[in-house]
Amino acid sequence: MAILTYREALNRAMVEEMEKDPSIYLMGEEVGHYQGAYKVSQGMLEKFGEERVIDTPISENGFAGIGVGSAMVGLRPIIEFMTWNFSLVAIDQIINSAAKMNYMSGGQFPMPIVFRGAGGAGGRLGAQHSQAFESWYAHCPGLKVVCPATPKDAYGLLKSSIRDNNPTIFIESEVLYGSKGEVPEQEYTIPLGLGEIKRKGTDITLVTWSRALGFAEEAAAILEKEGISVEIVDLRSLRPLDENLIYESVKKTNRALVVEEGWPVAGFGAQIAYLIQKNAFAYLDHPVERVTQMDVPMSYAANLERMSLPNATRVADTIREMLQ
Amino acid sequence: MVSSIPKDSQSVSELKEFYRQMVLIRKFEEAAAKAYSVGKIGGFLHLYIGQEAVGVGSIAALTPKDYIVSTYRDHGHALARGLSPKPLMAELFGKGTGISKGNGGSMHFFDRNAHFMGGHGIVGGHISLAAGIAFASKFKKEDSVTICFFGEGAANIGSFHEGLNLAAIWKLPVVFICENNHYAMGTPEYRALAVKDVSVRAYAYDIARDHIEGDEVRKVRDHVQVAVERARRGEGPTLIEVSTYRFRGHSMSDPAKYRTKEELEAYKKKDPLMRARHELELGGIKTEELDKMDLEIQTQVDEAYQYAETSPEPPLSQLHKYVYSEDK
């Protein structure tokens, strides 16, 4: 086992896949000469040259469209958005072009493209740079949506995403880039649509993904001292969704709480709550609850940002209430 | 109407072929309009009537390895590429035998084998996509060229500017063809465009430009050919404006009240089909021969109509198919 940071794991996944398959290229703002805004593509320009590690002007719609067009004729682009906040000017290409191409052509144009980059709140970046968009993209059939929480998952899931023949929204957590974790030295992949029990427990099921896993784990550690046993389900990908893993856990614990970084209204947690009541209603001892970001744009002020984001205290408090 | 009388047998037969394609498009569109009016075609239906010489002339400049990216007004381009009218009409009827298996409809014709890269419904969104296909050709060191059709309405959306800039800085083998029919839906160009000729926007990206009147099919071909060859030589993109006119409204639901009858009649005098027919007659083709050709094409379109009508709808099992691709 090597200890890698989340960004190093992502880098290793891209490098290995690009070494194997010459049809893969990486494109985005500052991915080459600058070595990546978050240094995820560090060293890749030197390895693969300007033909395959391609700096773009600030033209998200344009280079997302380049990616989609090139994927129609057999290339396998990795399109980096410096952050997912900027993907909104490219969302036409993602939703109207990438997600629809195979369907509206009657299966003639598979879309092997990965859109990846930093998502969620960073640290006091304000309203336009602190947004978790996975629920937006998960809404749309035709896309796959992947949100890894650990270096090990980031590596295995990115490799699967690159090999997938469908447009994949790969949302990395901005605050996790420097986080470290064990990553097997042997090559491996993690299939999309396979969640993982990150912590076994008996009293409540905590469903989460990406950065919010950290809040969940912290809360679980606090509650353990109080004799409360929390099971944590890390979904890892929202589309496809490992529904059975959720139900199996809920059937055991009889309670479920969704913890997510994004906003509550029409957030992905609402879909999970729907699925649990639909498919495991008889097992529930308590309504499904959610801990999400507050229903406000992000403030710059440190105290308000703290208050807006979910955290371990809110998670623990909610669980205590649910177990009363 | 004096220039370009075909002078030798080769140019006569070439013009005859272009005329055949244009008549096919015209009659196909007339049949589609008829089917639409009796409820056999749903959704929007944007007809290419009046603009035939643009598609036919432009696509004649291509080889089979080249790519075509089209708009929601894509029937004419597909027919000019040589796609059979049967699966195209069937697509309009929403049938399983359609070119996109009934999943696309009028705005989304696709044919991978013919390098017909779609009908795209979001105005201008496909411009950077076309640059992406050209990017792939360059990446793979193939000498294919991509041509991208769009209207003058698309010249004001961001994707146009981003696509042209990216194509310019990377010298991509793509030819941008603006079919200026002077109305973006109901908005005349003078109310929407800061320039009188879209092709001058090429200066902003330091790429080649051209402007053509779109009623003379061989002239369109000749000009587009220059741009295609430039792209194939690796000298980068060209922006061409072809001035044209649609004789019908924006779509079937548009009575086109925003323009005058006089204007329409003036343009109809420049009908590219009439022009080609007249030139063929001057080149020695007998009226009877042209009439016979028209009749044969009508039969071909009638058969396509019949095929579309009698084809089965897609199986219900197709609903979930193709959302994701399963093959690797």
Image (spheres, helix red, strand yellow):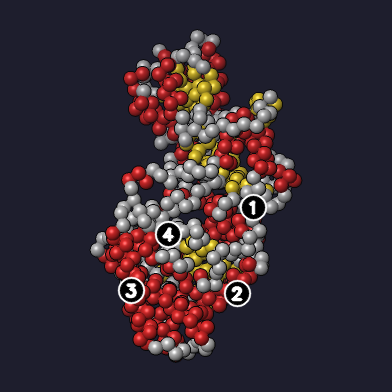
Q: Say what amino acid the circle numbered 2 marks.
A: Val
Q: Nearer the viewer, mark 1 or mark 2?
A: 2
* Disc 4: CA contacts within 10 A as few (<14), some (14-19) or many (>=20): many
Question: Which mark, by number, is residue A128?
Answer: none
Q: Residue at x 57, y 74 (%)?
A: B225
Pointer 2: what residue?
B226
Query: What is the distance, in whole Å, between disc 2 and disc 4 at their CAs?
Result: 27 Å
Q: Is residue A125 among what the camera can see?
A: no
Residues at discs 1 and 2 both on one chain = no
Query: Cβ–Cβ below 8 Å for labels 3 and 2?
Result: no
SS at mark 4 in the image:
loop
* Disc 2: CA contacts within 10 A as few (<14), some (14-19) or many (>=20): some
Pointer 3: what residue?
B298
* Disc 3: CA contacts within 10 A as few (<14), some (14-19) or many (>=20): some
SS at mark 1 in the image:
loop
Q: Nearer the viewer, mark 1 or mark 4?
A: 4
Tell me: B293 left or right of A187.
left
Q: Say what amino acid the circle numbered 3 marks.
A: Gln
Question: Which mark, by number, is residue B109?
Answer: 4
Residues at discs 1 and 4 both on one chain = no
Tell me: B102 left or right of B168.
left
**Relative image position of residue A241 (x, y in whole percent):** 46, 32
Residues at discs 3 and 4 both on one chain = yes
**Relative image position of residue A18 (x, y in whole percent):** 66, 43
Specify which label sits upstream in the sequence, 3 or 2. 2
**Relative image position of residue B187 (x, y in whole percent):** 40, 67
Q: Residue at x 56, y 44 (%)?
A: A114
Chain of the residue that carries numbered disc 2 in the rendered image: B
Q: Say what amino acid the circle numbered 4 marks.
A: Phe
Q: Nearer the viewer, mark 3 or mark 4?
A: 3
Specify which label sits upstream in the sequence, 3 or 4. 4
Query: Cβ–Cβ below 8 Å for labels 1 and 3?
Result: no
